Image (cartoon, rainbow, N blue to C red):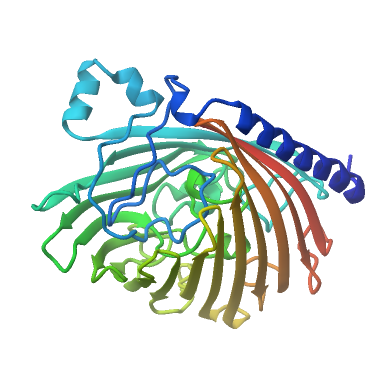
Amino acid sequence: MRIGRPQLFAAFAACVVGFGVIARSMADDLPPLGSMATSFDPPPAATPSATTPSTTAPSTAAPTAPAETPAASSPTETPPEPWFLMKSLDGTAVGDFLKRERIEISGWTDLSFTASTDRSSNLPQGFNYLANQFLLDQNWLRIDRPIDTNSSDPSFGFRSDTILPGSDYRFTLARGLFSGQLSDDHGGPNRYGIDPIQFYGEAYFPSIAQGMDVKIGHFFTLYGVETTDTINTPLFSHSYTDLYDPFTHTGVLTTTKLSDAWTVQAGLVLGSDVFIDPADTPTFAGTAKWTTKDQQDSVLFSVILGSGRFNQARDFHNPEVFDLVYTHKFSDNLTYNFESLFGFTTNVPDIGTAEWFGILNYLTYEISPRVSSTTRLEFFDDVQGERTGFAGLYTSLTTGLSFKPWPWLILRPELRYDINGESRPFENKHDLFTAASDLIVRW
């Protein structure tokens, strides 16, 4: 049965408002985070290292951009308290080995439901692409040996991130890396699949400039407010700008802290969203980030520069991308993020040069340590329809809450409205309304 938009909006809006009031009340009544001694207790808040993003940042924090961009250098603090999986290994031979080698194992499970005015599919919206159905979005396993930025000697580490299994894989999987899953179901993608989305070795050299980090392997792209690891992204659903641009690169990446204000990244990679495959092409990926002394403002400029030509022989997309992210902290509780993106590809069959533009605004308010709200306004112009399959300007407004009754449990309800006045991408309609929520259990 198709859900009526006015009734759905009114019902879910009431639920979200009511949930916010209840969550705020519960946040006041619950004991402080540090006093809830359970086997799921997370690590305490710690300052990220100069070159490695925090793997335990609470999802209620204001979004920062991007996850792979280093923060200002600071001494490495006491290792954080482990999550449930590491705690369960404490005192065992395996646990002792992991502790001795500074290896951390953690993960999370993300389940969701999206009510929709479409009948079966929300595409081209994603990752929650199924309408009126439950999804197992991510079972995420992270194995990490962090570099030690507190040492005066070079430090070495590694990271492995794997979706096993989850529905998100169909959007993030790189060509040449188990990509047969995308055609296993009668020529289409399996609903659930595995994606070794990130794996790299890492070295930190403190004597180069104010510190240089070198990664070799398969890693996330360098730009954007949103991230693929759902615990670090501000809302449950993703923007078109995030969804229809690269997720990963394979190659070598350096991150160099030049001063307290400036950090640069430079990488030579095999292309975008491709592993070891005949479609590989040499590509440059880089960023420059400037941060004010008081850490209230930052500007990040990122590029992907390669051939820029669609590989017709391999049916493979080689975009060139220019992205700018500005972040401003009005206060400890209120943060604004602005992102603008321009991408293009030449030699596209029946199109020639395909272009797309994205403009995003995020406003995040931390109501309490357990509750935050984020509103996102996006304009995404798929000029020729090469990215989404439907030409025209998409306007999307999303507002949602993030509630952590316990550190290991995150609930994120949201309301979203999308419209494209030039095409009918939503089951032959111009617009789409969704009311969604996911539940994340960290372990």
Lateral position of residue 219 relative to residue 179, left or right: left
Q: From the viewer's perspective, tell me whether residue 148 is left or right of residue 268.
A: left
x and y, in percent, of residue 107 in the image? 42, 34
Q: Give the image location of residue 179, x and y in percent.
A: 46, 50
Q: Residue furthest bottom?
A: 352
Q: Residue at x 73, y 37 (%)?
A: 21
Screen quadrant of the N terminus: top right
Residue in the picture at 48% in, 30% down: 33
- Residue 385 visible here: yes
User: Can you say whether 370 is above or below 299 in the image?
Assistant: above
Residue 347 coordinates in the image, percent (x, y): 52, 81
Q: Nearer the viewer, residue 306 or 49?
A: 49
Kindly give the residue lying farthest to the left in the view shown.
Answer: 153
Q: Does residue 315 appear in the picture of this structure?
A: no
Q: Nearer the viewer, residue 24 or 429?
A: 24
At which x and y percent is residue 208? 13, 66
Position of residue 301 in the picture relative to residue 19 (left or right): left
- Report the residue at 35% width, 43% height from top: 46
In the image, residue 83 sits, relative to residue 389, either above or below, namely: above
Q: Quadrant of the C terminus?
A: top left
Image quarter of residue 260:
bottom left
Residue at left 54%, top 25%?
Answer: 31
* Residue 3: quarter of image: top right
